[in-house]
Amino acid sequence: MNNYILMMVTAIFANNILLVRFLGNCPFVGVSTNLDSAIGMSGAALFVNVLSSCITWMVYTFILVPLELEYLKTVAFILVIAALVQLVEIILQKVAPALYRSLGIYLPLITTNCMIFGVAVLNVQQKHTFMQTLVYSIATAIGFDLALIILAGIRERFSLGRIPTLFQGFPVALITAGLMGLCFYGFVGIGQ
Amino acid sequence: MSPVITAILVMGALGFCLSLFLGIAAKLFFVEVDPRIEIIADLLPGANCGGCGYAGCSDYAEAIIKDNVPPNKCVAGGANVTEAICSILGVKVSLEERKIVRICCRGDNEKAKKNFIYKGANDCYAAILSTGGDKACKYGCVGLGSCVKACPFGALSMGDNGIPVVDETQCTGCGSCVEACPRNIPKLFPASQKVAPLCSSHAGGKMVKSVCSVGCIGCGICAKKCPEKAIKMVNYLPEIDIKRCNGCLECVKKCPTGAMVDLINISSNNQEENQKADAA
């Protein structure tokens, strides 16, 4: 149990997937302009991440390893993730059209999101058990959501502030993201 | 079995299972979309000007199909687009006359009195909020070009004397500038309208006289002299019933300040000037 808690804290803070491992930075900058779509993206990312990690782990453990096809894991994982994202898209379009529209292009982009694929690969590289895979994928997705929502909250405030013309839009977002990354590096020292 | 064949078989089976799964999901969560919406959205100009009263072209296309909104509201696309949409819907074409925007103020830097020199933010709203605008006339054009910035078709430009100029060949009558003006100076008129008062002042004659040399003083001479009784004075400004107006230009000739303007001639004059400018 202790191990799981430690794993979660590490994945959320010390090894935050966005700010320390730098995976999945496209939606981090792209969808963080307003809080609503950031929360929607967080939900979608959490769902896809957990589901794809579990399924890719099963595909790897029960299909690829017994047949000695480990070298195919990149192709197989991408296939699984793409199908899953497509599934999420179909369901969202039916169940929550407003969320579907606000996510726009970023939902299909989860297909090639480095975080989703990265977590899937990390799981098999670190030889996680299924339970560990589940916990690790939830934790990394929460880390992703945390950073994304914090940045979206900050960027919403920017619309009220006076920002020099030169820095408006992406420049100031990137600077903020960099400073957030520095803050999260502070967590690396925990437990040492 | 060689590893190559195993690999091909495994990946093929994996792909097949996933695609089967997706196919079932697509059937289960099928969202019915009328294919005509997309076709109509493609036909519309895609400028998202909002002239039809909807948020954008695709919104309007959706409204045409779902809420039976008449297909003739796209002012930017004009008759061609309306006809094309009508042919898809299978309804008869009903055209709305083309509208052109006119700047209903001629009080430029020379003709209108200014109270002070404004050096604030270059935006009509900002000027009115902070100082009420530099002109003495509180109905007149502020002259900072919020309408020019709002025009999605590049039909407006700021004239030399601080009053926007309409390029009638470019104007689609979408009304973006009407929305953008804090004082309702740009107004939409049917393209065939022959005369109009290019002044927006609801102030009385003495007041107008003291601040502008081309403002409408509300004397009502145009209304009295009109042989067709097409002009009615409302709140110190003439209103023209275009169905009655025969284009005799009596009102233009009799107007003591020149606020009533012959629109047809203005257009041809403008066009000649444009041509001269192009030639030069």
Image (cartoon, coloured by chain):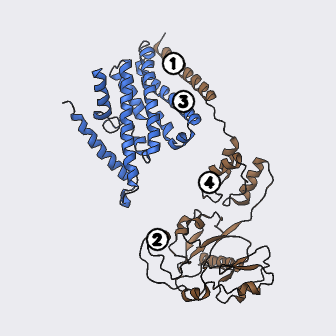
Chain colours: A blue, B brown
Q: Is residue A103 left or right of residue B188?
A: left
Pointer 4 and pointer 1 on the same chain: yes
Task: Indicate whether A183 appears above or below A54.
Answer: below
Q: Is residue B253 visible?
A: yes
**At numbered mark 1, what does the secondary structure look like: helix, strand or loop?**
helix
Seen in the picture, residue A54 relative to A94 is either above or below; the reply is above
Q: Quadrant of the C terminus of chain B?
A: bottom right
Q: Does residue A151 lie above or below B162 as drawn? A: above
- Residue annotated with mark 1: B8
Q: Position of residue B169 (x, y in %)?
A: 66, 69
Q: Chain of mark 4?
A: B
Residue at left 64%, top 88%?
B257
Return the disc, 2 or 4, that comes first in the chain's sequence: 4
Q: Are marks 2 and 4 on the same chain?
A: yes
Q: Amino acid at mark 4?
A: Gly
Residue B125: assigned label: none
Q: Which residue is mark 2?
A: B129
Q: Nearer the viewer, residue A101 or A76?
A: A101
- Residue type beneath disc 2: Leu
Query: Considering only order in the chain, which callout, 1 or 2, is on the residue closer to the N terminus?
Result: 1
**Secondary structure under the numbered disc 2 in the rendered image:** helix
Residue, far left: A192
- Given the image, what chain letter belongs to the residue carrying mark 2? B
Answer with mark 4 or mark 1, whichever residue precedes in sequence.
Answer: 1
Q: Are marks 3 and 2 on the same chain?
A: no
Q: Are marks 3 and 1 on the same chain?
A: no
Q: Is residue B154 visible?
A: no
Q: Chain of mark 1?
A: B
